[in-house]
Image (tube, rainbow, N blue to C red):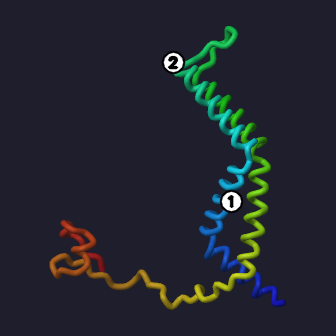
Amino acid sequence: SNVPLLLSRVQHNLAFFYLNYAIQTAILFVLTLLISPGAIIGMGLLGLLWAYVVRVTSEGSVEVRGITISQKTATYGMMVLSACVLYYVLSHVFWWTLSTSGILIGLHSLLRDASMHKDEEDKVVMSGDFSGDVNTGSEGEFLNPGDTTMNVV
């Protein structure tokens, strides 16, 4: 119908509900991960491999077929391996979560009329005269107990 009004609604809802959308996406990711046995097994094996590498290199280095590998090098190697394994293992979980939450967020931002939250009447202006004189018993004493030098005007 009226495209500028719909775009305004979507823009406002994305700005207003962004934290809800992020939490929803995180929950969908965890739920999708829980029902994906391959991802759970892959992450478990990766965790065991990390524990093994940390244990083997706990003395600073390890020797593999005559080559000494420092703990720092082993950690960097595990980081690269982990990134590749997680990309492979979690790719379907990631895309499923991203597409599902994208559809839900899109529908919500299109259909939810949150114009009641657009009013600016309840905003508190954070400028003006502030007397923080501690001798008068005003708010300065509450805000800065023990500070007798405060006097902001």
Where is the C terminus found, in terms of image quarters?
Answer: bottom left
**With respect to residue 26, does 108 lie above or below?**
below
In terms of sequence position, does the residue under pointer 2 or pointer 1 come before the other?
1
Horizontal and vertical percent position of residue 108: 71, 76
Residue plotted at (68% across, 50% down):
34
**Label 2: element kind:** loop
Please state which amino acid type lies under the numbered disc 1: Leu
Q: Residue furthest right?
A: 1
- Residue corresponding to mark 1: 28
Query: Eyeballing the image, is 112 above or below 97?
Result: below
Q: Helix, strand or loop at disc 1?
A: helix
Residue 124 - label: none
Residue 2, percent from left and from top: 81, 90
Name the residue carrying label 2.
Answer: 59
Query: Could you tell whether 133 is left or right of 68 in the image?
Result: left
Residue drawn at the location 61% of the way across and 29% of the way down = 75
Specify the amino acid type for callout 2: Glu
Q: Nearer the viewer, residue 101 or 83?
A: 101
Residue 133: % across, % down: 21, 78
**The N terminus, quarter of image:** bottom right
Other residues around mark 1 within 10 Å, as few (<14) / some (14–19) / many (≥20): some
